[in-house]
Image: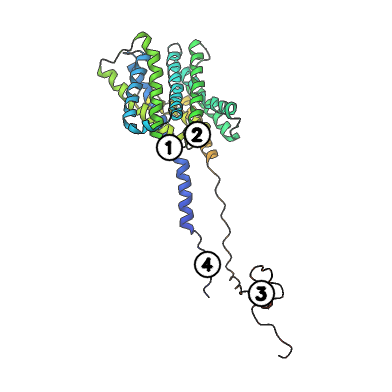
């Protein structure tokens, strides 16, 4: 009778499984890093564009274009959404739009470095909002990474300690950013990324239009303004929102907030590459703290490695003998005192008689 065997995954299969788990954990972080890199590229571009157009007009035109493109790409899928999905997307977009407006208004009376630091405070506000709304406390290592990231932002951005009305407005925007990060992390899972991005863009455009319409929206008139508008509508509008929505469906809000604090690091790198800034000790220390915080958060967010199950026993399975046809209860194919039971106790040999 052939021996029964059980196939177990070999080393190559186990290695492939580990690589798949690592990819599922790493790809969302890589997507958010790309988002922060695109965000970081906008500071120099936006600085020049705002010399020719007001912030409200810029935001209105930018997100109107982004919403129109996303609605076109999503197409008929938007018609299949129910009211709940529409309300969720529009609500998320409204949060993001309000945060954008508050940050832009606060920037008028706040130094750019201070504004960048206060905006980045969502890295510690996100776990606080998460605790208040969900009664779920993040892991200690994640909280430590949040404090490290905030310290890096302080070293990188702060040159003074003065606060103003603009700083308080910017802080309010940071709170709203934290709300958006937490809400997106809870609502993005299980939703179609394309339609959720489109509905968010519609919500952002509506909020920005409501803020800009009272004074009248002025459309850009020169290529020097249209270039930044199109870049920030497509690259840092559609692409970043799509990637952020996709990534946050696969990671916790607190981890996402820590990764997104790399934005000022990329902004500084772009400024250095274009010759607008020089590499200083403060920039190096602040950037190192932020990157270390991101790595700490990433390590704490990895699922524990599965323990290897013990190899199956190689012992030959016992052969079960069929029970004879008899009345009475049957247990494991035999009954106490039956011939087959006796045969089993004598290792399959017939019982020895006194005459042998």
Q: Which residue lies furthest to the bottom in this view?
A: 355
Q: Nearer the viewer, mark 4 or mark 2?
A: 4
The residue tagged 2 is: 294
Measured Cα–Cα span from mark 1 to mark 4: 43 Å
Which of disc 2 and disc 3 is earlier in sequence?
2
Measured Cα–Cα span from mark 3 to mark 2: 72 Å
Measured Cα–Cα span from mark 3 to mark 1: 69 Å
Measured Cα–Cα span from mark 1 to mark 2: 11 Å
In this rendered view, identify the residue nearer to me: 163 or 286: 163
Badge 2 element: helix
Measured Cα–Cα span from mark 3 to mark 4: 33 Å
Q: Which residue lies furthest to the top in this view?
A: 215
The residue tagged 4 is: 5
Left or right? Give the position of 64 relative to 254.
Answer: left
Could you say where residue 29 lies in the image, as x and y percent from the top left? 45, 37
Badge 3 element: loop
Image disc number at residue 326: 3
Q: Which residue lies furthest to the front in this view?
A: 327
Q: Nearer the viewer, mark 1 or mark 4?
A: 4
> In the picture, which quadrant includes the C terminus?
bottom right
């Amino acid at each position: 009778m052939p021996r029964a065997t059980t196939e177990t995954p070999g080393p190559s299969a186990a290695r492939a499984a580990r690589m798949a788990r690592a990819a599922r954990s790493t790809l969302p972080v890589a997507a958010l890093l790309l988002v922060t890199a695109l965000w970081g590229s906008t500071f120099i571009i936006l600085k020049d564009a705002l010399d020719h157009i007001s912030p409200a007009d810029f935001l209105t035109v930018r997100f109107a274009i982004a919403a129109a493109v996303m609605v076109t790409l999503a197409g008929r899928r938007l018609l299949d959404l129910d009211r709940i999905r529409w309300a969720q997307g529009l609500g998320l977009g409204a949060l993001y739009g309000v945060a954008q407006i508050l940050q832009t208004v606060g920037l008028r009376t706040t130094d750019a470095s201070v504004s960048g630091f206060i905006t980045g405070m969502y890295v510690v506000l996100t776990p606080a909002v998460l605790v208040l709304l969900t009664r779920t406390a993040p892991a200690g290592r994640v909280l430590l990474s949040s404090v490290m990231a905030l310290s890096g932002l302080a070293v990188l951005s702060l040159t003074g300690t003065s606060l103003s009305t603009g700083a308080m407005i910017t802080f309010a925007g940071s709170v709203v950013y934290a709300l958006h990060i937490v809400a997106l992390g809870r609502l993005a899972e299980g939703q179609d990324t394309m339609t959720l991005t489109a509905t968010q863009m519609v919500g952002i455009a509506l909020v920005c239009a409501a803020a800009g319409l009272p004074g009248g929206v002025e459309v850009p008139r020169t290529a020097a303004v249209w270039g930044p508008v199109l870049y920030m509508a497509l690259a840092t509008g559609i692409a970043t929102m799509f990637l952020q929505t996709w990534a946050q469906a696969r990671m916790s809000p607190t981890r996402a907030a820590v990764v997104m604090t790399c934005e000022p690091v990329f902004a500084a790198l772009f400024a250095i590459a274009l010759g607008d800034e020089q590499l200083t000790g403060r920039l190096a220390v602040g950037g190192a703290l932020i990157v270390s915080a991101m790595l700490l958060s990433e390590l704490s967010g990895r699922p524990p490695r599965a323990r290897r199950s013990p190899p199956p026993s190689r012992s030959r399975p016992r052969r079960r003998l069929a029970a004879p046809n008899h009345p009475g209860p049957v247990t494991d194919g035999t009954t106490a005192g039956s011939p087959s039971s006796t045969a089993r106790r004598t290792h399959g040999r017939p019982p020895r008689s006194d005459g042998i």
